[in-house]
Amino acid sequence: MDDSSGLKPKELEFTLAAVSQFSSSSLSSSSSSSSSVIARFSADSGVAELRFHRDSEFIDGFNVDIGTSQLFKLGPVQSLCVSEISGAGKEKSYSRAVTIQFRNEDESRDFHSAFEQWQKDVIQGIHLPNGAIAASKSKFDYKIEPSSAKMYFHYYGQLLHQQNMLQDYVRTGTYYAAVIENRVDFTGRVVVDVGAGSGILSLFAAQAGAKHVYAVEASEMAEYARKLIAGNPALAQRITVIKGKVEEVELAEKADILISEPMGTLLVNERMLESYIIARDRFLVPNAKMFPSIGRIHMAPFSDEYLFVEIKLQALFWQQQNYYGVDLTPLYGSAFQGYFSQPVVDAFDPRLLVSPPLCHVIDFNEIKEEDLFEIDIPLKFIASVGTRVHGLACWFDVLFNGSAVQRWLTTAPGAPTTHWYQIRCVLSQPIYVMAGQEITGRLHMIAHNAQSYTMYLSLSAKMWGPGAVQGGILQTASGKLDLKEPYYRMSQPQSYTMAQDQQPQQLLQAQAIPIHTEDLDEAELLQQPSENTGPQLQ
């Protein structure tokens, strides 16, 4: 668009199956209705808007300011448009939503593409009434609460926290080996380091012969990275440090390799994986390499009476009826639930696992950013022992699928401990199982704007013995946890006596699993043999 011409952007129209206010059905239409709903992109009075019309009449109260809105997929043909509204003297908040029903998946995809294009191109170019150019926001700014982002970048802008990660020798050593042993992938190639931090991965890539490395870092650590890289002159001439978010910065050329350490606890905490995917789409040439290329979340039910009692005891403080003359018991129930809403971060003995684990695969080469907004994992296990199940234990691993060598970085229990440790979701009500009994459930994670996830966990045990087919579900326990607010226990695994009917062999046997992504699809990756339950560092 030529800004000097004074012309408004060309309007776009889409015919919808239905549109309604979120949680309201007062203004909706169906695909069978004789009066269709039209969604129209327009830029009247210098404001880019999405307006809805029925029978050529504007539907009052449904217009959406594209510059302050987000569009989310709820399903193949349903989306949610959330608008930012600010009141006088108050912080902005996303408080208004419109649900949109499309006639088919193709129209849904076209609508999302148009919405994104208007945010990217039109919002940045239209003339406002006062002649100023509208300030644009990146995807990161739309998704993440400013206070959370400020604390996040402050944390990673400090050398002591970078040192903590550098001194995780499993982490740093695996990255170094994955890069150096795959020189064939790096030699003469252009590399982008996403969330470069101290610049250590950029330096590894340069050591492996990269033609040029773009180290993108949004925090103040970018200045330290420049110092560190400048202090290594043999490599510095092939590394450019760029201070900014991957959602915002522009590079001089496309890259052949993307390298990053985007993993948080449970792999997805901090939501940096989304930035990793955005960088893939923005910066890479077709068929480029990603280091890492695959992530897996492993899960298994566990039994740990010590941990369960420890959490319950923390809430006993609120059972005091005469605390300096004050009865604290009205808050006991809230405190009890609060302690059980915290995932436990520590290292535990793998013998606490009640069954072999299953895994959920995330292929970084294929996954879409919006697929990480909501993660739904069905659970199904067969108990190896008779015991009380206290919750779900989780850990992750990632694959560096190099052309010469494949390497896994694992955080599995029983493997060398990393700074990620493992994570356990403890239920306030345990369930009882017998050896051979089926345990089912669901782990449902929903991203929130504090750069983490709300976790909804449920576990159920079916009736055991004769008549089970008529008995149905006997016990169910559920919990809601916030991955942003863990309980950092972080103890080293203790020695536990085995349950009476537990076999002496370990339930978890960590070993390498070669995966050739060109030969397997995700469904096959999920169906790993039960004995291959967790790779170890090679």
Image (cartoon, grey):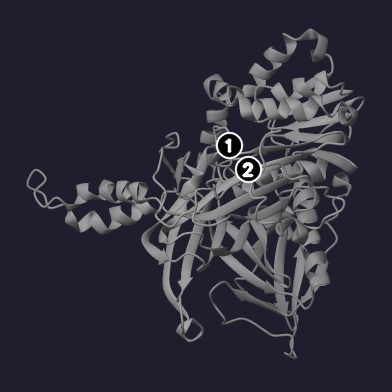
Q: Nearer the viewer, residue 134 or 231?
A: 231
Say which residue appears at 68% left-offset and 19% top-offset. 225
Quickly name the residue at label 1: 415
Category of crowding for the residue at label 1, using alpha-carbon neighbours closer than 10 angstroms: few (below 14), some (14–19), many (at least 20):
some
- Relative to 382, is 192 on the left or the right? right
Residue at (44, 59) in percent of width and height: 480
Return the residue at label 2: 510
Quadrant position of residue 45: bottom right
**Quarter of the figure that contains the C terminus:** top right
Say what amino acid the circle numbered 1 marks.
Answer: Ala
For the residues labelled 2 and 1, the Cα–Cα distance comes to: 7 Å
- Residue 325 visible within the image: yes
Q: Position of residue 424 (x, y in %)?
A: 47, 49
Residue 168 locus on image (x, y percent): 58, 26
Residue, x 71% and y 29% (percent of image)? 175
Q: Residue at x 61, y 81 (%)?
A: 27
CB atoms at circles 2 and 1 under 8 Å apart? yes
Nearer-the-camera pick, 532 or 128: 532
Query: Relative to 162, is 71 on the left or the right?
Result: right
Point out which mark residue 114 bears.
Answer: none
Q: Earlier in the sequence, mark 2 or mark 1?
A: 1
Query: Can you give x and y, in whole percent of width and height, for residue 477 in the image?
Result: 42, 66
Closer-to-camera residue (374/182): 182
